[in-house]
Amino acid sequence: MIISLRNISITIFLIISISGENCDGPLCSHVFDEVCGMAELKDGTQIIKRYKNFCYMKAMECELSSVMEINQVADDLCGIKKIQTRREMDHTLTGAIQVCNHSCPLSCTEVSDPVCAKIWRRYSTLRSSYRPFINHCHVDLFSCTTGLNVTIVPIYSCYGSPRVLTFLEHIAIMKYLNIMD
């Protein structure tokens, strides 16, 4: 039996979460990047639910680990539709520079997942610049604090040569391995 929960809060989760293990892991960022998760109870019942982001799903899994396991499943099972840019489709506006409907994060993790942002100049649909960021959340934070529209573009757009990007990746690996400060 599969139960689909979209925007329904279930009190049973609150009761069950008390019995979960101590989950003092890293705090989740507030970036709204929905994922679909399927929980399987010990009796075989499956529950499909949306989570704010992957970290929130894993935090819930930790809390409920004594009674269920939660795994990420295809977004379409929860009715989640994603697009390749950080903007939501807004058909009330025209053009590539649309108002950002993406939630603003309060903080970001420092996890390295480099992205390149095309930053549109204020009051211009033709002028832009490129800037690398440590991860997608930092792009959102930048956009929200400056009020500038941004679009995620391929990472090589921020660098004049792919060799520069390879060099930067090697530096990051050496820092991660504590070979270099």
Image (cartoon, rainbow, N blue to C red):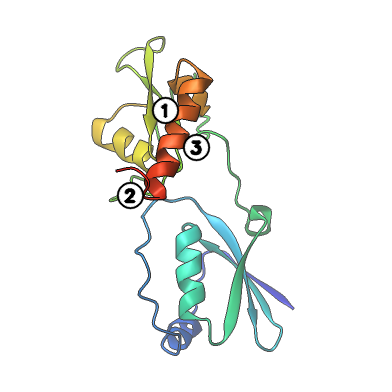
Q: Quadrant of the N terminus?
A: bottom right
Q: Is residue 58 left or right of residue 39?
A: left
Q: Quadrant of the C terminus?
A: top left
Report the front residue among 36 and 163: 163
Q: Do residues under tags 1 and 3 come within 8 Å of each other at their CB atoms?
A: no
For residue 41, above or below residue 87: below
Distance (Cα) linking label 2 and label 1: 16 Å
Which numbered mark, 1 or 3, is in the foreground of this view? 1
Point out the tag, 1 or 3, that comes first from the N-terminus: 3
Say what amino acid the circle numbered 2 marks.
Cys
The residue at 32%/33% (across/down) is 143
Point out the tag, 2 or 1, that comes first from the N-terminus: 2
Q: Is residue 45 left or right of residue 62?
A: right
Q: Position of residue 135 (x, y in %)?
A: 41, 41
Residue topped by disc 2: 108
For label 3, the SS is: loop
Mark 1 Cα within 10 Å, few/some/many (few <14, many 20+)?
A: many
Residue topped by disc 3: 88
